[in-house]
Image (cartoon, grey):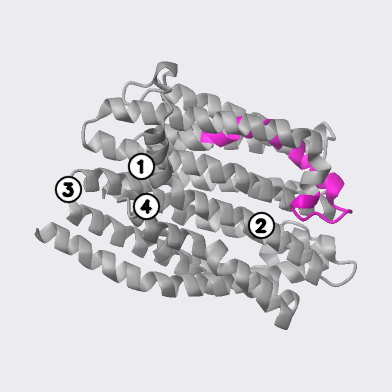
Amino acid sequence: MLVCKMAVPTIIAMVTTALYNVVDAAFIGRLSTGGTAGIGISFAYMTFIQALGFYFGHGSGNHISRALGAKNIASASVVATVGFITPFLLGTLAALVCLPNLSWLSRLLGAPESVVPYANDYLRYIVVATPFMMSALTLNNQLRLQGNAHFGMVGIVSGAILNIVLDPLFIFTFDMGVSGASLATAISQFFAWTLLFCGTFRPESVHIRLRDFKPSWKVYYEIFRGGLPSLFRQVFNCAAAVSLNYCAVLYAAPGQEDSAVAAFAVVTRIMMFAFSVVLGFSQGFQPVCGYNYGAGKYDRVRESWLFASSVGTAFLLVISAVGFIFAPQIVELFRAEDPTLIEIGAVTLRWQCAAFPLVALFTTTGMLFQNIRMTGPATLLSVCRNGLFFLPALLLLPLWFGLTGVQMAQAVADLLTFLLCIPYAIWINRKLKNFNNC
């Protein structure tokens, strides 16, 4: 099926990207618990980068896929150029503001004082690379949504492989510690950005040309409509990451704050790695959805959505079972020297695995709504998991259950999001059937 063909390169790109986040945590875990906590704190800043990168990437990319389906190449070129240059400029501004204020930024993201030096070390080079990381995410999504997922995969995977190679060299050989992991990530992201940018000059790609940089309210409104669900989703991901850091410190036993923050950082990377497969498969469905919807082939839109949801759910059932059974052994791979980290991490991982299979349906359904420009339900579903349901759960459950409440918050949010998604899924299924019968 076409969804599988489009999904394979995207899955490879997503898994490889998630893998180097896992590798970063594994290498730093060999140094100290504080270092692992530091990269956990830094993750919140990276979700900020992802928020704008995915917003402009999905917003411009969704328009590009529909414009190509309607044979409107000129509109696709303008939106692609504006969608790429704008996040690069915003990333540059963010770097200029944050670089002189790293300690303030680390504390803002939830770092306890003992972790601030480690967080600073990891943030330093990541902040410098912000414009390239942000616009690389945009480019990857633009290439994917115009049907050039294979080249997008090459750019992302090449950068990730370089990161995995440079990590031990900088961390251990050059004795740079946490800063070495950060520098390796920054270099690899710049390398990936270069390859992705070169990919826009391929004959089959929509070209990025400076003369097509024609920012206007109309162009930004198109990006806004297509990218708003992604922006909300990623903004709430950022808020969730920061809130999780604060709650881990607040509800951990005295003297265990660093271990708690590190444990949640480890589990977050494990779940990201598993989720990257489903996300990659769902993103492989997006260009198929956008193109066929633009061409009026609603039966293909419906079939590809149901297929992506079913495959994602089946995969997560298997992964969740493995994660639940072997939770202590999996967490131990990251920091075997800290039994407190392993204990907290294993309980957290089991809670998240309990509801993880439910994620596939509302992920693919949200992407369906996003691609067919039903912004309201797409935005609602995108903000539930880490916003509408997660943040209240994170604030309320610990009041009754302490640290266990923090550990179970994500599972509760996933269950509630799934229940909310069901009526929307039934409704859009019937609507697509009716479209096809018209």
The main secondary structure of the magenta stretch is helix
Looking at the image, tell me whether mark 2 or mark 4 is earlier in sequence order: 2
Q: How far apart are marks 3 and 1 (CA)?
A: 16 Å
Looking at the image, tell me whether mark 4 or mark 3 is earlier in sequence order: 3
Which residue in the protein does label 4 denote? 370
Q: Mark 3 Cα within 10 Å, few/some/many (few <14, many 20+)? A: some
* Residue 125 covered by magenta stretch: yes
Under mark 2, the amino acid is Ala
Q: Distance between the residues labelled 2 and 3?
A: 40 Å
Q: Can residue 247 be seen in this view?
A: yes
Under mark 4, the amino acid is Gln
Q: In the rendering, which numbered label is found on residue 296?
A: 3
Under mark 3, the amino acid is Gly
Q: How far apart are marks 4 and 3 (CA)?
A: 16 Å
Residue at x-position 33% and y-position 49%: 371
Which residue in the protein does label 2 denote? 241
- Residue 323 screen position, x and y as percent: 59, 67
Q: What stretch is highlighted in magenta?
A: 107-136
Which residue in the protein does label 1 denote? 62
Residue at x-position 41% and y-position 30%: 216
Q: Mark 4 Cα within 10 Å, few/some/many (few <14, many 20+)? A: many
